[in-house]
Amino acid sequence: MAFLPDIPSRLAEIGAKALQWLELIEHLSGRAQSPLGKSWLTALQPSADAAWIDSQQQRNAEMQRLLASGGFDFRGIFDVTEMLDKAGIEGAALEALELRAMIVHAERVEAWRQIVRTPPDAVREQWPGIEALSSPLLSYDLGDLLRSLTGKIEPDGSLSDNASPELARIRRAMAQQHRAIEASLRRALAKLSDDGSTQDALITVRGERFVIPVKAEFKRKVGGVVHGSSSSGQTVFVEPLETIEHNNELTRLLDEEQAEVHRILVAMTRAVAAQADALLLGAAILAEADAHLAIARFATEFACVRPTFAGDAAPAHPESAGGDFELTAARHPLLEMRLRAQHGSIVPLAIELPPGKTQMIISGPNTGGKTVALKTAGILALMAQSGLPIPADRARLPLFIAIYADIGDAQSIEQSLSTFSAHLVNVSRIARQADHDSLVLLDELGSATDPEEGAALAVAVAEHFLERRSWCIITTHLTSLKVYAAKHEGVLNAAVGFDEATLSPTYDLRLGVPGASAGLNIAARLGLDPAIVANARSQMTTQQIDIGRFLDDLHAQLTAASSERESLDAAQRSLDAERRRLDQEGRAEQQARTRQLERELAALIESFEAQLRDTVKAIGDKTVAQKIARDSALRIAQLKREFSAQFQSTVVAHNPPPTGGANAKTADRQREPKAGDLVRLQSLNREGRIVRALDAKTFEVSVGAMKMRVPRSDIAEVLASAEKPPSESKRRGGVTVASAANSANQDYMTSEINVIGRTADEAESEVDRFVERAFLAGLPRIRVVHGVGMGILRRTLREFLGKHPHVTSITEPPYNEGGQGATIVELRQ
């Protein structure tokens, strides 16, 4: 059984030493909980197989979800191969501690099997990669094994008394025998202690026999067997005659115990061997799962992202898509770890090769971060192709078949090579092997030799890799390489930042411009004799001076432009925030005024209705009074609906829609509207919800509590797709009412009221108000939930509703929709 990753299409070369790959893997493996997980990570290598990389990235992402929900304890799993080979031998017995370790391993495997069968909510149906990895384990069941072994082995490796009934019996007998022996020896000691024959009043053991110490001169006085003497010879250890039989019986019981223990261990070993396949398979699966959880810890700690590769599906945000080589806010993981340990922070890098460019020339002063940028690109490419998330905000990379790196001091004393010669040997080998699917990283190309010859050689090497279409990043101080980059279409200049005022690097990377080495400026600021600096400047050609001055000016302009852009962005953010605040205040004030008008209107209507009721009561003829009351109620309801519609239209006309709809999707705005869509009406300049399509050119639209028929031409745009009605409700005084976050969106009214638990009078009052609201909202029917109980509330409400002027009929719903516990009420239209 393989406990290490099966990596297809390994890269031909990865520059492991130069890019500190092994150091990174060591840090990763330290986050694993089991030796198997550590070994799995230690063996991890990058691959050129896109499917394998994708599966690893998927499993890592899924384990991050599991980690967020609590993770899993992988401690206790180990390579069980050797123990299972031993257990497979007929009649063999594993040691008790070995069996205990196997039990812990089996517990972890079974716990993982259970979590895969019934995942926690955080990962349910969201971890197909881990389910595929673990699915072979689902056909096994280690429950019986654990039930038969758990609790039978103590932490010190001894068997517990309940390991078997026979063992419990033997140990009870042994305990009884111990007590008999102790009593026998105590009696012997009591007889001898009076005349001083005993050395000490204690019981000891010699040769697994319980004895008492007796002074040598009195040994003949004690009848029994002598089992040796002390080192001084003054004390002998005697087993009294009356104790011999007890000790013999204890010895026999000890032999029985050992035989029973061996029998139990053999049986346990046989049970373990019967589950060898599950235990081996579990070790292999949990080894990889532990490794992925360790990677998830790293990804969470360092805010890593899942990279994409050239040739993958288009990015989710096409407007932000760059070239095939793009690292946004990238961070070198080892450097970030070191800076965190020193309570510092890392400066993220943007390393990008736009479409059509395969080579980047990074220039700038010493200590400015050129090598850091080079190593960051290299190690993140290795991580991406090893299936690891990488520390960046966004990453898109080509799929390389080899990564070559020539970084640092390559001097070799053993081979009698100078630094230049060693670099040249390495670059020569890379030049022969690298092709269009390779990433080549060259640090300080052309250095350590004559500047003119080194510059010519560096340009020639760079051109070679450009012709081979290899992906290539080169750091340099050479002006000729900067000029070469400016002259060739497929090459991009880049510069690392350096603050000459403080003589410190900024570690940022500016794309599209070369960097100035600034060696003489730094020397002057560090206090070198001005005469020496002046002499050095005089040695430079006019062209070199002009280029240096131009680069200094260019970087000064870039710094000023960057600062100005940041100021403009801050000002724009401030203006946006102020506009949003004013919009919110204006809408809040308008809504408050609208609610106040609605309250005043409701008060006037209630006052009018009260006066009407008083007038009706004054009519002597009861039949006439009832007819007038019914006709008046219908007329009042009709007038209220008409007035409410006019009121809402007025509010709509004076309440322009919020300006926050600019982010609506263009596709939604242009498509044909359908029931449930939120739309903007051109005539009212207000949002409304489509209730239904009356025909191909006419829709019924609700705006607040008002419903209206509008032609298709009046629908200016679709603002949002169809939404489900609010699923949550709030209970106020036992009545179920719809909840909304703000009054501008209250275009949905629930069609059900729940009055269970209310008195008859309370329920009648609540239902009356609800019917009124439903009638004004234009609902065709409502459902009143009153429960069954004694039937009093049902009868009261049905009698009341049967006489209500807004109600046309009442019916009892089917049993599966409430039966006698509810009433369906049809409203007048």
Image (spheres, rainbow, N blue to C red):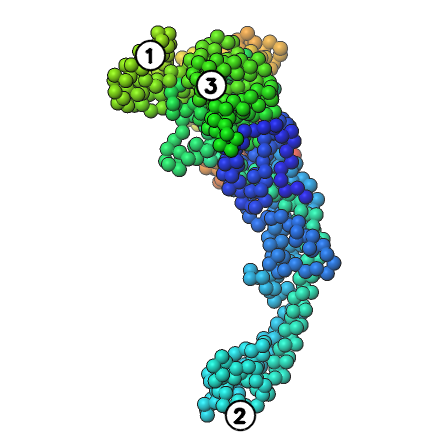
Residue type at mark 2 is Lys
Image label count: 3
Q: Where's residue 392, x and y in %? A: 48, 27
Front-lying residue, 730 or 263: 263
Disc 1 or 2, which lies upstream in sequence? 2
Q: Can residue 752 be seen from the camera position used here?
A: no
* Residue appearing at x 35%, y 17% in the figure: 518
Q: Which mark is residue 446?
A: 3
- On screen, residue 10 versus residue 732, left or right, reads right
Residue type at mark 1 is Gln
Q: Which mark is residue 539?
A: 1
* Residue appearing at x 72%, y 56% in the figure: 89
Alpha-carbon span between mark 3 and mark 2: 102 Å
Q: Can residue 187 be seen from the camera position used here?
A: yes
Nearer the observer: mark 1 or 2; the answer is 1
Q: Which mark is residue 235?
A: none
Pointer 2 residue:
221
Alpha-carbon span between mark 1 and mark 3: 21 Å
Front-lying residue, 725 or 611: 725
